[in-house]
Image (cartoon, rainbow, N blue to C red):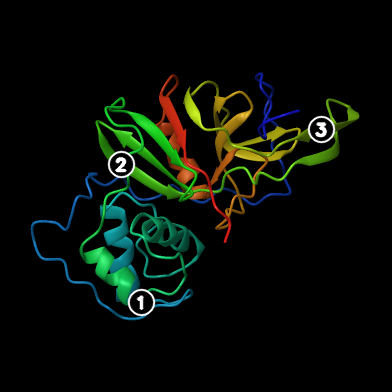
Amino acid sequence: MLSGCGTQAPQRAQASPVFTKAVAAASPAAAGAQSGPAAATVTAPRKTLKLGAKGKAVTWMQKRLTELGYRPGKSDGQYGGTTLAAVWAFQKVNGIKPASTIAERTWAALESPKSPKVLVKNGEPTRAEVNLTKQIMVMYVGGEPKLITHVSSGSGIPYCETTTWQGKEQRFCGSATTPTGNYQTTWRKSGWHKSYLGQLYNPIFFNGGIAFHGALSVPLYPASHGCVRMPMNVAVELPGMLGKGVPVHVRGKFKRP
């Protein structure tokens, strides 16, 4: 039985013309801590926003999310899918049911945000923590949460798939789980990498065939073969922050509604 979504030994990466290009890198990482509002009073626009909204209130939200360590993409005043993924991450950290509509509870949390729960006390200053319960990943640098993102981990639904791999038709079966435990980052590939179970963007492996990687679909529920999917803009930025041999801690368990 396999566990994961990638090959466990380095393979030559293969680009796939059927996928769209990765989005541009997100805004520079913010200065980290989220223990509470900044020294100056933070006042949110408090305007109800729906996906597709445009304007100054969206720009304010994007800039605030970036300040807090999330990755909403460019602060361009357009509320699209990249910003939505950052909103979901923020809502989950702050105990708000993820939704695309920005209303009173989310605005209030943006004024007085909570910090993500630390999963490993006294962990290494630079480390990645994956919270399977909340489906988020937090990248710590110097002990501060520098990147917080929405993710989608292993679905937990056993699978068997037949595909052409290494020149012949093969059948692969696995548990589609993302095991909890303590690991370290190993090898990686830049751009699209073809594995026996699909395409991974900028994969960073940390547990055999299990990797962090960008994906064109990162739903609100665990949906992968075992890897940790993340938004494309985050996958563009993460390799520059997460080096080789960095601790990766996976904790929790997702409970389906």
User: Spatial distance from mark 1 to mark 3, Cα to Cα?
Assistant: 45 Å
| Residue 118 against residue 90 in the figure, above or below | above
User: Spatial distance from mark 3 to mark 2, Cα to Cα?
Assistant: 37 Å
Instruction: Say which quarter of the image contains residue 58.
Output: bottom left
Q: Where does label 2 land, which residue?
A: 146
User: Spatial distance from mark 2 to mark 1, Cα to Cα?
Assistant: 26 Å
**Residue shown at 35% from the left, 50% from the top:** 27
Residue 218: % across, % down? 57, 53
Q: Judge left or right: residue 216 versus residue 46.
A: right
Q: Nearer the viewer, residue 54 or 92?
A: 92
Q: Nearer the viewer, residue 141 or 22?
A: 141
- Helix, strand or loop for disc 3: strand
State the residue lying farthest toward the bottom. 47
Q: Earlier in the sequence, mark 1 or mark 3?
A: 1
Instruction: Say which quarter of the image contains residue 256.
Output: bottom right
Q: Nearer the viewer, mark 3 or mark 2?
A: 3
Amino acid, disc 1: Ala
**Which circle marks residue 103 in the picture?**
1
**Disc 3: CA contacts within 10 A as few (<14), some (14-19) or many (>=20):** some
**Residue shown at 31% from the left, 40% from the top:** 118
- Helix, strand or loop for disc 1: loop
Q: Nearer the viewer, residue 35 or 254?
A: 254
**Residue shown at 44% from the left, 65% from the top:** 97
- Helix, strand or loop for disc 2: strand
Q: Nearer the viewer, mark 2 or mark 1?
A: 1
**Which circle marks residue 172 in the picture?**
3
Q: State which quarter of the image contains the N terminus.
A: top right
Amino acid, disc 2: Lys
Q: Nearer the viewer, residue 3 or 231?
A: 3
